Image (cartoon, rainbow, N blue to C red):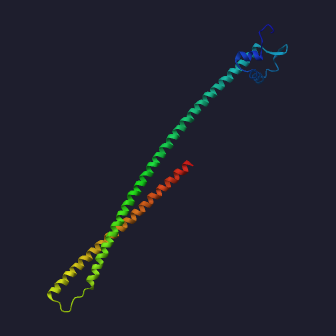
């Protein structure tokens, strides 16, 4: 046995390119530390023990490399998922901003239309009041007890004008009623759009919290 070229723990470690403490750890794992021979004041390793130690170190390296490769693949997969989520968030944010812009335009359009219809309604109301005043003036007229033909003719003309004004009054009242109904529907629509916009903004804020 002594004719063999036996290596010390440090010599084997240097040959394998690892630390002496690592080789010593492998020896203890293999429970060879009680079986080493001692030459002088140094422990030496037999060929059989050396083979066992080298095999164990190579297996450890293989396991480490496999774990490293697996970890790298896992990280690559995670990075791909993170990139996908970033793209998805950017898309959702862009789409959300477009939706809010469209809602703002709808609200602005409806508000302008509502304002126009309110002005028209005020104009019609003013015109209707003028016609009502004229009707009241006609009602105040009284037919004389003894009318001349000319007075009777004038009275009949006034009666026709009164009927005409009454017809116009009814027409305008009907139009104003329709306008008021449209105004109410548009106000309700604006409130619904505004509520939907606020709900989406709230959900988006909670998403980013």
Which residue is the extreme one toward the left? Answer: 149
93 sits to left or right of 157: right
Q: Is residue 156 above or below residue 186?
A: below
Q: Residue at x 70, y 21 (%)?
A: 57
Please tell me how many numbered marks the rendered image carries. 0
Residue 40 rendering spot, x and y as whole percentages: 85, 13
46 sits to left or right of 142: right
Closest to the observer, 176 or 148: 148
126 sits to left or right of 154: right
Q: Residue at x 37, y 67 (%)?
A: 181
Is the N terminus in the top left, top right, bottom left or bottom right quadrant? top right
Q: Residue at x 29, y 82 (%)?
A: 136
Residue 132 rendering spot, x and y as whole percentages: 30, 78
Q: Is residue 80 above or below residue 164?
A: above
Q: Is residue 39 above or below residue 98?
A: above
Closest to the observer, 157 or 18: 157
């Amino acid at each position: 046995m002594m004719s063999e070229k036996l290596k010390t723990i440090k010599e084997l470690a240097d040959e394998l390119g690892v630390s002496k403490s690592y080789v010593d750890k492998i020896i203890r794992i293999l429970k060879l530390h009680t079986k080493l021979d001692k030459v002088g004041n140094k422990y030496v390793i037999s060929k059989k023990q050396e083979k066992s130690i080298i095999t164990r170190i190579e297996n450890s390296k293989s396991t480490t490399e496999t774990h490293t490769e697996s970890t790298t693949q896992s990280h690559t997969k995670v990075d791909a998922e993170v990139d996908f989520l970033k793209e998805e968030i950017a898309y959702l944010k862009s789409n959300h901003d477009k939706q809010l812009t469209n809602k703002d335009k709808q609200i602005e359009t409806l508000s302008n239309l509502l304002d126009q219809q309110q002005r028209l309604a005020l104009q019609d109301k003013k015109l209707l009041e003028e016609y009502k005043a004229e009707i009241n003036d006609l009602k105040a007229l009284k037919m004389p007890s003894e009318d001349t033909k000319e007075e009777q003719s004038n009275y009949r003309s006034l009666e026709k004008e009164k009927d005409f004004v009454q017809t116009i009054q009814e027409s305008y009242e009907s139009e104003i009623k329709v306008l008021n109904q449209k105004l109410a529907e548009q106000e309700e629509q604006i409130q619904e759009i505004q509520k939907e916009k606020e709900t989406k903004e709230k959900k988006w804020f909670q998403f980013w919290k």
